[in-house]
Image (spheres, rainbow, N blue to C red):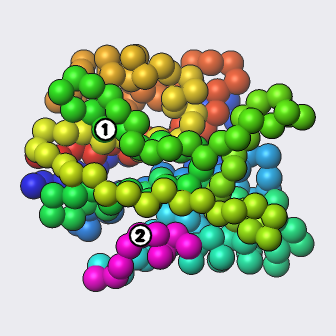
Amino acid sequence: MRITGYSITSIGARQQNQDSFLVDNERSLFAVADGIGGGERGDVASLMAVTGVGAHPDEGGRLRETVETIQQVVLKEAMDSLGDARMGTTLTAVRFKDSTLELCHVGDSRCYRYAAQHLQQLSTDHETFDEGYGAPVLSSYLGIPTDLFPFQVQDEDFPIAAGERYLLCSDGLYKQVSENDIMKMLETHAAEPQKLLEALVAAAVVAPFSDNVTIVYIEVD
C-alpha cells in the first residue's frame, strides 16, 4: 500500500505556535505534538517530541520505547532549564508497517480514522476532571513529573486497508470544529488533500479565542 501524508499548522489567535509535527512519507512515520500552554517552553517540548519520533530507528522496536525515552529527555530539560516540571507536550505518533498502524499516544491530541463515511477516534484522551479548576485537565503528557503522577501511554495496533484516511490533530481542531463538520469536509475535499487541510484550519481559527491548530492528514491507497 502507498502511504502519503500532508500537513498544515496555524497559530490561531495565540501569540506563539507551540505545536510541532512530523511527516516522513519515506518511512510512513507521522506525528503531532502540542506544547502545554499552561507551562513554559511548550514549543521546545513539542519540537523535542517530534524530533525524537523522527529519530526512531527503522529496525527498532515499538514506538513506545522511543516515547518513553523522550519523556525522560523532556523532563530532564524542564528540570535543567526551569528548575521544575513546568514544561511538557502531548504527542500522537503513528507508524504504518505492512498492513498495520502502530499508534503511540500521550495526552489529548488525537488520531482519527475515516473509512466507509465514518469518523472514528482511535486515540484515548488522557484527561481527568479537576474539581478546583472546574474542567478537564491532562492526566498524562511528555514531561510529567512521574514521582507525582503516572506516565500513561496508549500503545496499540490497528489493521489498515486501502482507501482509509487518517487524521492526526492538536486539540485546536476538534475543540472548535465538530466531528460531524470534520467528516463533511473530508467528504467534500476527498480528492484535494491540501484544500481539505486549509478548510479545516479556516473553520478552526474563526473562533475569537482559537488555539494553535496542527493537522497531519494521511492517505492509504
Q: Quadrant of the N terminus?
A: bottom left
Residue 165 % position (x, y)? 24, 39
Q: In the rendered view, would you say 35 is above or below 82?
A: above
The answer to whether residue 40 is left or right of residue 132 is: left
- Distance between mark 2 and mark 1 Cα atoms: 19 Å
Residue 150 is covered by the magenta coloring: no
Quadrant in the picture for residue 7 = top left
Q: In the rendered view, would you say 44 is above or below 217?
A: below
> Which range of residues does the magenta coloring cover?
59-68
The answer to whether residue 157 is left or right of residue 134 is: left
Q: Amino acid at mark 1?
A: Arg
To which residue does mark 1 refer? 113
Q: What residue is at 69 percent from the left and 50 percent from the top?
A: 139
> Which residue is more in the foreground, 121 or 4?
121
Asked if residue 139 can be seen in this view, the reply is: yes
Q: What residue is at 45 percent from the left and 45 percent from the top?
A: 123
To which residue does mark 2 refer? 63
The answer to whether residue 168 is left or right of residue 102 is: right
